Image: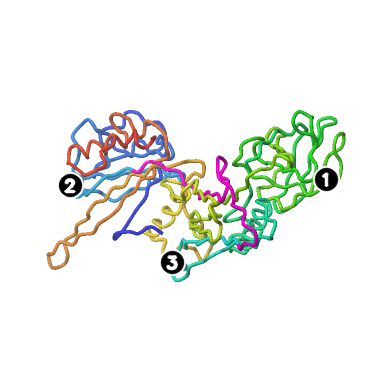
Amino acid sequence: MEKERNVGEILIVKSVAATADMEGVNVDNFLSTLAVGEPVVVDAAGRVIDATGTLPAKFKIGVKLTSGVIQWTDLIDAGSIRSINTNRYVAAAAPLDYIGFNGTSGSIEVINNNLYYIRMYIKPTDKFGFVQQKVQFGVYNSDSNATQAEIAHGLAENLAFNLSREPEKLRTGKDVITVELVNSGTSTATSGGTIGVVKGSKYVQILGTGADAGKYNGDAATIVAGDYIRFGHATTKTYPVYKVESVVSGGGATTMVVKLSTPYRGESNSAIAAASVGVIPAADVANFGIKLTGNIPEFEVTKFHFQVPFYDVTLEDFGSTLYTRSTTPTLGSGDWREISQLEQQFIGNEGRIYRVSPFEQAYRSEVSSSATYALINIEHVDTMTGNLGNIETSLKQTRIACAKGNGGAYSDANTGLGTILNAYITAKGIPSNGVTIATEINA
């Protein structure tokens, strides 16, 4: 939910060409020719504003909806605008962390007869989590002849099991945080056919292109128990590795089936290219790391909010083991899910008072899941004379979500949305972040 001051509204506009010769003409003449998603700025009488002419004291912004009608903002008094600011698109990012080897350096310190303890302090993402602090954990008690492999496997399995009880995992089968192993050993690409994996299964199918099923290093070697398979890229060391527990069947001229020591935790894929899978021979296995990959939960407007997981990690009794936060989580700005959420919320100001309709009525949606959006934020004041002659003021927010692009509807010298707003900023001395709006939209 987004905080509103009195009332908010949002328009969803597209990067399209500007309709020609509209300036100074009533917009009614162009209703059939405006493109869906095309923005238009008019004066109080409905005439399209010309950025190079005299700017009227009041204006409103409209956009043509998929239904063919125009959605209009309030009539905005330019003299009452407190600010016009633009937020460029910033991609959302889920967290990525490493304990031990991080793809470049580091390891898990081996300590015999030691209780290793990982704590993950998962931060709440809604008001219901305010009164709780959820802590997930991974523990492993090493023996008197400990190894990095033993410690890494034990910790990863315990942490993955505990995270498997997260509500998102139980509801959708999606891991909020994926727990995998990485290794500093050098791998070489498999040389057979495609590889098939199934999320949650220990069994991997390796096809051949002749007599090379299960072969690697240009057919110079064959996968055996104790080797590690690197999935996703043949040699890049930030990709996860899985230990081969046994070769179940096949090899050479027949499809090989191998059993991993732990279930595959990536997404199912029946046709991974041989060049995207590498093998680390058992003798070349080196330093281990535990890779923690955050995943954006399922989103459905009105039901499941757009969020990314936020958490902190602490390590207890790990000695000098390196901890690396490789990617810091952020919601970013202008993700289509964020804009869809805002659109549905602000529709409530148009009279749709139910956040979720009890009658399963469809809500208007102009947001494209394939688009990224920049936001124009206009804060202005609406005034009204009360019954006793007193002046009442209401702070309003008008937001325009602009699909990223350099369409003429943003930049046209006469009728472009960005051009007109920049003209008002200059003419009225409106506070802004000092950007050329049409350029910033596409930045």
Left or right side of 285 for 238:
left
Between the residue at mark 1 and the residue at mark 2, the CA separation in whole angstroms equals: 76 Å
Q: Quadrant of residue 271?
A: top right
Image vertical order of residue 254 relative to residue 312, above or below: above
| Label of residue 79 in the image | 2
Q: Which residues are magenta?
A: 87-115
Left or right side of 206 for 108:
left
Between the residue at mark 1 and the residue at mark 3, the CA separation in whole angstroms equals: 50 Å
Amino acid type of disc 3? Answer: Lys
Split into 4 quadrants, where in the image is the N terminus?
bottom left
Front label number (1 vs 3): 1
* Residue at the spot of label 1: 247
Amino acid type of disc 1? Answer: Val
Amino acid type of disc 2? Answer: Gly
Instruction: Return the residue nearer the eye: 392 or 133.
Output: 133
Residue 142: x %, y % from top left: 66, 60
Q: Secondary structure at mark 3?
A: helix
Instruction: Return the residue nearer the eye: 198 or 310.
Output: 310
Looking at marks 1 and 3 on the same chain, the residue that comes earlier in the sequence is marked by 3
Split into 4 quadrants, where in the image is the C terminus?
top left
Residue 225: x %, y % from top left: 79, 45
2 and 3 marks in contact (CB < 8 Å) = no
Between the residue at mark 2 and the residue at mark 3, the CA separation in whole angstroms equals: 38 Å
Residue 373: x %, y % from top left: 42, 42
Q: Quadrant of residue 160?
A: bottom right
Image vertical order of residue 178 relative to residue 54, above or below: below
Left or right side of 424 for 213:
right
Residue 175: x %, y % from top left: 60, 55
* Residue at the spot of label 3: 127
Q: Secondary structure at mark 2?
A: helix
